[in-house]
Amino acid sequence: AIEPDLICFSSVISACEKDGQWEQALKLLDEAQERGLRLDVTAFSATISACEKAGQLEPALQLLKRMELLGVMPNVVTFGAVINACEKVNQWETALTLYAQMQRRGLEPDYPCFTSIMRVLRNCGQWEAAFSLLEDMKRRGILPTVPVFSSAIEACEKGGQAQMAGQLLDEIRQRGLEPSFDCYAAVLRSFVRAEEWDRALGIIDQIGDEVLEPSREDSEEDVRRGDFHDVRRLCLEGDWEFALRTLEEMQ
């Protein structure tokens, strides 16, 4: 009988990854090792990706340690998969630890790594770390895109940093980018929470001019425009509680 080689095992593990069968992927990796096959970064990365897809951070971290014990060097794809697993379970500190490990190993994080870390920082309201990551991206010559800025702005919003959220919105424009609806909405919520009515009204005016499409019957933009008219009225009346409630219902 023909014995399966590591390429064969890696292919089946990749199939498990696509099907969300992380436990089966682990079993296959173990079997390959038991057969005396020398595990490589491809086999490990595929298994880690299977864990990541299922939101299984702990097994992914254990696999990373196992690679080190076997002398298999993880690459950017490997780290990226573990960082994605961190995002799925909102483990921002672990994501930043992995980011630091990449740098110590001389690995250059790619754009998907940055976006995944930024999303977990957004989810956890870690605005200082999000701002620091933005600065690091710029130092490395990786230009942040609108979705990355949006995540950083939402981290500022969750952290109660209205001024910082506003500064990031200004930076998006200064870079010649078009802020998204989510960027404006997060900054607006920040200003409303801080009861900065004038700045909140200014954001509403910008949203109406730059983001929402011309009103079309029964369109989503038409509904949004109506919602923002309500928020504007509430801001003018100084009713921040109802303005914020309306904004949160729009999320």
Image (cartoon, rainbow, N blue to C red):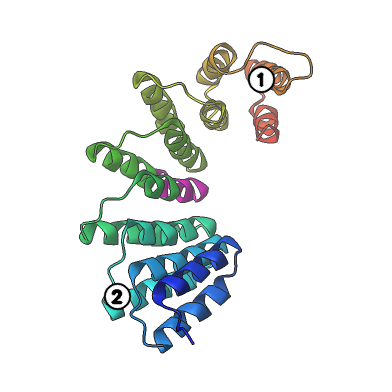
Q: Which mark is residue 240?
A: none
Q: Tell me the residue at 61%/63% (across/down).
A: 19
Label 1 crowding class (10 Å Cα cut-off): few <14, some 14-19, many 20+? many
Residue ID for mark 1:
228
Q: Tell me the residue at 37%/57% (across/down).
A: 77
Q: How many marks?
A: 2
Q: Is residue 93 visible?
A: no
Which amino acid, mark 1?
Answer: Phe
Circle 1 — which element?
helix
Q: Is residue 26 visible?
A: yes
Circle 2 — which element?
helix
Pick whichever, 211 or 2, lies toward us.
Answer: 2
Quarter of the rendering occupied by the C terminus: top right
Q: Position of residue 42 (x, y in %)?
A: 38, 66
In the image, taking residue 170 as reference, residue 221 lies left or right, namely right
In the image, taking residue 140 as reference, residue 228 lies left or right, namely right
Pick whichever, 233 or 38, lies toward us.
Answer: 38
Question: For residue 149, which quarter of the picture?
Answer: top left
Q: Which mark is residue 68?
A: 2
Q: Position of residue 160 (x, y in %)?
A: 49, 39
Q: Verify whether residue 118 appears in magenta.
A: yes
Q: Position of residue 201 (x, y in %)?
A: 56, 16
Kindly check if marks 1 and 2 are in contact, taking CB atoms under 8 A apart as contact: no
First of labels 1, 2 by sequence position: 2
**Secondary structure mostly seen in the magenta stretch:** helix
Label 2 crowding class (10 Å Cα cut-off): few <14, some 14-19, many 20+? few
- Image: magenta residue range: 117-127
Which amino acid, mark 2?
Answer: Glu
Q: Is residue 53 above or below residue 196?
A: below
